Image (cartoon, rainbow, N blue to C red):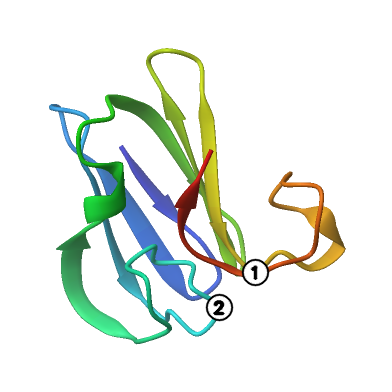
Amino acid sequence: AVSAGGFHSLALTADGAVWSWGDGGFGELGHGDQHRQLQPKKVEALAGQHVIAVFSGRYHSFALTADGSVWSWGDGDYGKLGHGDEQRQLQPKK
């Protein structure tokens, strides 16, 4: 599966791994930084999780795992990551 946000993309592989690329200015790529990725890079913070769905918003991203957990990262304005705050998350957070 592939999801395209405003300036970044996510890909979900058959084995449940998540890859991201594009603009990372808000941490929406999930690599622990705010750098741009010109080629797909595996989101290592989700290693060991069996992701079954991904969604990319304009400056944020979500992953749903097989156990029903929701992980989110990127721009947290307006509480859109669902963590109870407006903090930017540079890596996936449950």
Q: Are marks 1 and 2 in contact (CB under 8 Å)?
A: yes
Residue 14 location (% of width, % of height): 15, 27
- x 33%, y 86%: residue: 36
- x 37%, y 71%: residue: 32
In the rendered structure, the answer to whether residue 66 lies left or right of residue 38 reads: right
- 83, above or below 29, in the image: above
- Looking at the image, the residue that sits furthest to the right is 78
Q: Nearer the viewer, residue 7 or 27?
A: 27
Q: Which residue is mark 1?
A: 75
- 45, above or below 63, in the image: below
Ranked by sequence position, the earlier of labels 1 and 2 is: 2
Residue 38 location (% of width, % of height): 22, 82
Q: Which residue is mark 2?
A: 26
In the rendered structure, the answer to whether residue 18 lies left or right of residue 89 reads: left
Residue 55 location (% of width, % of height): 50, 44
- 68, above or below 55, in the image: above
Quadrant in the picture for residue 82: top right
Label 1 SS: loop
- 44, above or below 15, in the image: below
Label 2 SS: loop
| Amino acid at circle 2 | Phe
Residue 84 location (% of width, % of height): 81, 48
| Amino acid at circle 1 | Asp
Quadrant in the picture for residue 16: top left
